Image (tube, grey):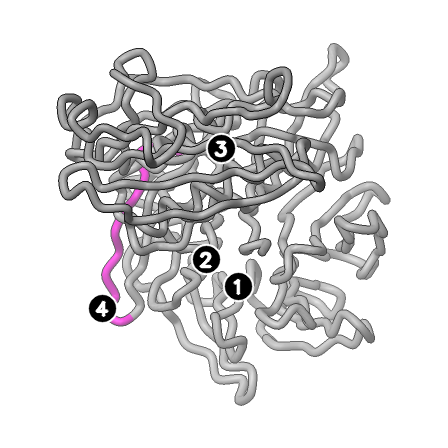
Amino acid sequence: MIRIALIVFTLMALTSQVSAQLIIEITKGVDNPTAIAIVPFGWEGGGIPKEDVATIIETDLQRTGQFSPVPKEDMLSTPQDKSEVYFRDWRALNVDYLLVGKLVPTAEGLQAEYALFDVYTQALVLEDRQTGSAESLRDIAHGISDRVYQKLTGIRGAFSTKLLYVSAVGRGDAQYTYRLLISDVDGARERIIFESQEPILTPSWSPDGETIAYVSFETTRPAIYSHNLRTNERSQLTNFKGLNGAPAWSPDGKQLAMVLSKDGSPDIYIMTVATRELKRVTRHFAIDTEPSWMPDGKSLVYTSDRGGKPQIYQVTLASGYEERVTFEGSYNAKAKVVPAGGGIIMVHRSMGRDHIALLDIERGKINILTETDLDESPSIAPNGAILLYATKVRGKGVLAAVSLDGGTKYFMPSRFGDVREPAWSPFLN
C-alpha cells in the first residue's frame, strides 16, 4: 500500500453554531489509484457560486483512496463542455478519466451539466445533469460524486448521506457539554440536533433517514428518545428503572431493538414504535446488550457474556433459538451487520488491544482492519464500502474511517473537544 501525503481539508460548517468542526486527514490509499481530472466547473450566472463544485467532487473521490485527482495547476486546459475536450492534453498528464461540467442558472435555481470521459479510449462514459437551488450546490456536487463513483467502481456512491456523532466539550470547571450533531459525510454543514449537560449515547438512524433514536441521561438516568429530523419532534420512548440503552431500528422502521434491565439483568427487547408495545427477546442472568438487526429483519446479533466473556450471539426472532457466532479472541462486541449481509463488523480484542474487525460469517474468519488502540462504535456506510469508528489519537477522541478491505484510511478529528458515537445514515434518496 502506498501512503498518500497527509492532506488536511478544513471543512467549514454553514451554521453559526460552531461546535465540533470536523476535518479530514487522509492517511492511506490503495496502490495505483485511478488518475482523474475534475476540471473547474464553468458558471454562466453573475457573481461567483457559493461553493466550488469541482473541489467538493475532487475531495469526495480522493477521500475514498481509490482516486488520485490531478492538481488544477497542472491542467493544460480547462474545458467546460464536451465539445471543448482535447484528449491529447490529458494523455500528456497520464489521466485515466476526465470530468467536465458547467453550472447554468434556471428559473427554479440552477442546473449542473457534466460529462465523464475515458481519456485513452476517448469514450463518453457518463453524461447527465442535476438540478437544485442556489443553496444546494453541495448536494448537487455530492450527487455528481455518487454518479461518477458508481460508474467507475460499480458500487453505489454514499457521498450524499449524512453522519450523526456526539461531541463533548469541557469547560474550565470540568463540566462537559454534550452535543448530538449531524453533518455531511465530509463534515460540512454541521448542525446541532440536541444539547445537554449529561451524556448522549448510541444514536441510530431509522431506515428512511427521517427519524433517529438515542440515549440521553438528561433526567439523571438513561432513557431512549426518538427525534424526527424533519419536524424536530422529540419523544421519550422509555423511562424504566435501570438500564435503557442501545436502540437499533428494524429494517422496516417499525420496531426498535433495545436493552432494558427493568426485569432484572440486561436483556434484549423489541418495541413496536407505533404502540410502544414491548416484547422480550432474551432471558438470561448474564448481560445481553448491543443488538443489531440482520438485513432480513428475522434475527438479531448481540453481545453477551453468558459464556464468561463478551462474545457475539445471534437469536432467531420467530423461534427464540440462540447461537454463538464468535469464538476467536477473548472479547468481541458492538456488532454491526454489513448491509449486503455475509459479514459482521465488530470490536475485537487482540493482544490486549481493541481493534475493528470484519467477521466472515460463512468462513468464521476474522480480518482486523484497524491498528489504533481503543477502537469502538463501528458504523458502516450504506454501500458497505467503508466504515466509521471512534478512537483516540494523542489522548483525544476522534472519528476514523477504514474501507472493508483495509486499503483506505482517514481520520476525522475535531478542532474543539472530543467526538465519538458515529452513526452513518442510510441512503437518503
| Label 1 – label 2 distance at C-alpha | 7 Å
Residue 287 visible in image: no
Q: Residues within 10 Å of mark 3 (few under 14, many from 20)?
A: many
Q: Earlier in the sequence, mark 2 or mark 4?
A: 2
Q: Residue at x 76, y 65 (%)?
A: 262
Q: Residues within 10 Å of mark 2 (few under 14, many from 20)?
A: many
| Label 4 – label 3 distance at C-alpha | 30 Å
Most common secondary structure along the magenta stretch:
loop
| Label 3 – label 1 distance at C-alpha | 21 Å
**Hey, what amino acid is under mark 3?**
Leu
All told, the count of numbered labels is 4
What x and y, as percent, mark residue 412?
A: 48, 28
| Circles 1 and 2 in contact, beta carbons < 8 Å | yes
| Label 3 – label 2 distance at C-alpha | 18 Å
What x and y, as percent, mark residue 390?
A: 49, 37
Q: Which residue is mark 4?
A: 363
| Circles 2 and 4 in contact, beta carbons < 8 Å | no
Q: Which residue is mark 2?
A: 335
Q: Earlier in the sequence, mark 4 or mark 3?
A: 4
Vertical relation: 56 (above or below) 328: above
Q: Residue at x 79, y 47 (%)?
A: 221
Q: Which residue is mark 1?
A: 292
Asked if the stretch drawn in magenta spans residue 270, the answer is no
Q: What span is colored magenta in the figure?
A: 362-373
Asked if the stretch drawn in magenta spans residue 367, the answer is yes
**Hey, what amino acid is under mark 2?**
Ala
Q: Residue at x 61, y 42 (%)?
A: 164
Q: Residue at x 49, y 76 (%)?
A: 296
Q: Nearer the viewer, mark 3 or mark 2?
A: 3
Residue 3 visible in image: yes
